Image (spheres, rainbow, N blue to C red):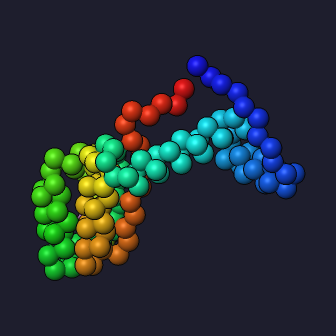
Amino acid sequence: MVKRFGISLDDDLLSGFDTLISRKGYQNRSEAIRDLIREALMEEDWRTGERIGTGIVMIVYDHHQYNLAQKVTGLQHSHYQVVVSSLHTHLDAHNCLEVIILKGKGGVIREIADNIISTRGVQFGRFIPAATEKKPHKE
Ligand code: NI
């Protein structure tokens, strides 16, 4: 069931919001506000760490660096129940881009992601929380 409610905003805030959502391609304010609320709720789920979630780790590293590729692979094998999939791309003669999809308790996933990203020699790393379970899907 969909419920309606009103929001009071001052002109500046509203015009800033309208500019933002039109740049992002939203068709209307309701859809933009729904996404903001979903994002906030998802963030809260991740913060508590108990809910099952899916997240993506992206790292860039030089595979020539001593033992680094083995360490990154080793970390994934140590948590094989949580690592859903990984994609390895050879960017050039030295650098590798690896994308790892994790699924499990939010707190556990975040810890594994931090371990991978903080591995010595990893040049660039990001963790992106993608979704948590038992939340309304986008219509
Ligand atoms: Ni490679």
Which residue lies at the image location 12% right of the left edge and 56% below the top edge?
77
Q: Relative to 86, does residue 118 appear above or below in the rendering?
A: below
Residue in the foreground of this view, choosing between 91 and 42: 42
Q: Residue placed farthest to the top in the image?
A: 1
| Residue 107, horizontal then vertical, whole percent | 30, 55
Which residue lies at the image location 37% right of the left edge and 37% below the top edge?
133
Quadrant of residue 71 in the image? Answer: bottom left
Q: Is residue 76 visible?
A: yes
| Residue 6, horizontal then vertical, whole percent | 76, 35
Quadrant where the image shows the N terminus:
top right
Quadrant of residue 29 in the image? Answer: top right
Residue in the foreground of this view, choosing between 115 and 121: 115
Q: Is residue 101 visible?
A: no
Q: Relative to 112, does residue 132 appear above or below in the rendering?
A: above
Quadrant where the image shows the C terminus:
top right
Is 97 positioned to the left or the right of 39 in the image? left
Q: Residue placed farthest to the right in the image?
A: 11
**Count of numbered badges drawn on the protein:** 0
Is 63 positioned to the left or the right of 26 in the image? left
Is 91 positioned to the left or the right of 7 in the image? left
| Residue 62, horizontal then vertical, whole percent | 27, 74
Is 106 positioned to the left or the right of 138 in the image? left
Q: Relative to 109, does residue 5 appear above or below in the rendering?
A: above
Q: Relative to 20, does residue 96 appear above or below in the rendering?
A: below
| Residue 24, horizontal then vertical, whole percent | 67, 47
Which residue lies at the image location 66% right of the left edge and 41% below the top edge?
32
Residue in the foreground of this view, choosing between 59 and 119: 119
Which residue lies at the image location 80% right of the left edge and 44% below the top edge?
8
